Image (cartoon, coloured by chain):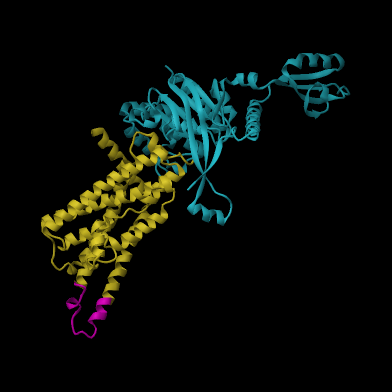
Amino acid sequence: MLTRTLTWWTILRISLEERLVYRGDFALGTLMRFLPIITQIFLWYAIFEGERVGSGKTLDQIEVVGYRYQDFVAYYLLTMLSRAFSSMPGLASGIALQIRDGEIKKFLVQPIGLMEFLLLTRVAHKLVYYVIAAAPFALVFFLCRGYFVPGWPAPEVLACFAASLIMGFLLGFFLEASIGLIGFWWLEVSSLLFVYMLLSFFLSGHMFPLDLLGEPWGQIVDLLPLKYLAYFPSAIFLGKVTGQELVRGLWIEAAWLLFLIGLSRVLLWRGVKRYSGFGG
Amino acid sequence: MSIIQIERLVKTYQVYQKKEGLRASLRGLFRREYRYVEAVRGIDLQVEKGEFVAFLGPNGAGKTTTLKLLSGVINPSSGKALVMGHTPWKRDNAYRRRFALVMGQKNQLWWDLPAQESFRLHQQIYRIPQSAFQQTLDELTGLLELRDLLKQPVRELSLGERMKMELTAALLHSPEVLFLDEPTIGLDVVAQHNIQQFLRFYQEQRNITILLTSHYMKDVGALCKRVVIINRGNIQYDGSLTGILDQFSGHKIVTLQFAKGEVPENLEKFGEVLEVQPPRVQWQMPRAQVTETLAAILSRHTIEDMAVEEPPLEKVIADVFAQNDLDAARESFAGPSNQDNGSARGNS
């Protein structure tokens, strides 16, 4: 176990070092991720302003589909945080590229698991991201603290929130890894990835809170794993999911995670069996 | 027991066949045609511990496929192989810790980091004790003259230096079997020579088993006592390098420099004329007739200089490949039952 931990630590350490090579590009990329959320907040501000004008109410008194303006801002900030855990830029396309150009051979020849390696390099990727993004994140949350009307949630809710973020990270990883492993059959997965990104944008809660969806969409979204990537952690923090529903949600998320871990293992096993060793 | 045992090993690839044009591309969306290519066609081979064996063959002969099978990168269509008692495509970690694969065109080092970081990772992956790691690293970097380059990012190394680093990474865990696929491809003459020297020294010192594929006959000549010629997925020769000449070349190259005005007429009657640069003439003659022909010429003409040589190995091997291609083409024309290495089949 100690040897294995040392191997993991070495992979993590080297991945961290590699991440820091192109620090300028990485820092710029990290900061640019704040742009979409700013546009979303401005969009909802415009909608609320439109409702307010002529109504004689203040902005705080206006409700759109059960949400006040500050609820939207708080929600979007929290989804941004959730996405910082669950999004996996370049993972699926990277796996497919490794299959196509033959780089994947080294994982078949060396005594190390591909998924284990990719997971550790992704953890390193995220850690560097959090270090660079921590200060801007903290600043944005501090400036917007007034929008979090109920204040800090109870410690047990915070624990559930943290659990949902960590599971969201793993869920996102194994989901995108599974898409990448389809590269063993298709070689190119960019279109599939595009469809996934599109669905994820709408059905994970990234675009709008999922409780705005009417039936049957609400039920469909409940059956998919995508809501755990953005909506679910935010809903826990904001107290929209509580009690039995919260516990049930966490169990379903864990079940999805186990399913996707199993799926990625099956895809890797079957894929390697049919692999032709492309690329010389 | 042989360290590598291969029995009736077959690998058939399914290769998508796309006809030219947009119409064919659209049709390919719904119905695809595949060709089944037998890259390895039931080869048998035994390699003993400590042998340095070269796989020779033209592109697409099945050399690299064989190495991929033996290193467990791909699964065979049928047949058996045991390397040090392990079936390669089971990919047991116990097996993977005992061999290494180096592909001349593939990079296993971290591109943006110094090679020593990759070496450290190899130490952990292969569970090499610190003292053994340091000793092997010192030895390899000393032999390959890499010590000053360990802190330099891999992307900033020359091709030759990168290949030396790849070899170092591959040998850190002291593999008992080493598969080398075109290790000197793209390198200049000096770098090729350095790597050849290193491989010869290392193999003799450690008595490891090496299987090498290369297009450079100098690699093969400098390193391997045993040569396996593989073409169209079949083994066509297995023996010493010089044995290739005995088996496949029935000729010698004879070069004569005649005294002034002594160049005979009807040069063709002595053999196949390769070059005429009076007073120098070069022939290719049947081995059995060399003595007799030379005696006849010497009895009538004054000779200033003379050389009788074996034909260049590259040419002999190229002739063997060309002859095989010709035979295969003849067979395929002979009838549908004797097809070459592929059979067309529709598949949706």
Task: Identify which residue is drawn at 55% across, 37% down.
Answer: B342
Q: Is residue B110 left or right of residue B286?
A: left
Magenta stretch encompasses residue A50: yes
- Which residues are the magenta region? A47-66
Task: Identify which residue is drawn at 43% across, 26% down.
Answer: B80
- Residue B65 or residue B52, whichever sits in front: B65
- Residue A175 or residue A134, whichever sits in front: A175
Q: Is residue B277 above or below residue A86?
A: above
Task: Identify which residue is drawn at 45% across, 39% down.
Answer: A276
- Residue A90 or residue B256, whichever sits in front: A90
Can residue B183 be seen from the camera position used here?
no
Q: Colour of chain B?
A: cyan
The picture places residue A3, in percent across and down from the top left corner, at 26, 33
- Quarter of the view holding residue B297: top right
The picture places residue B340, in percent across and down from the top left corner, at 59, 34
Can residue A80 be seen from the camera position used here?
yes
- Residue B4 or residue A146, whichever sits in front: B4
The chain that appears yellow in the image is A
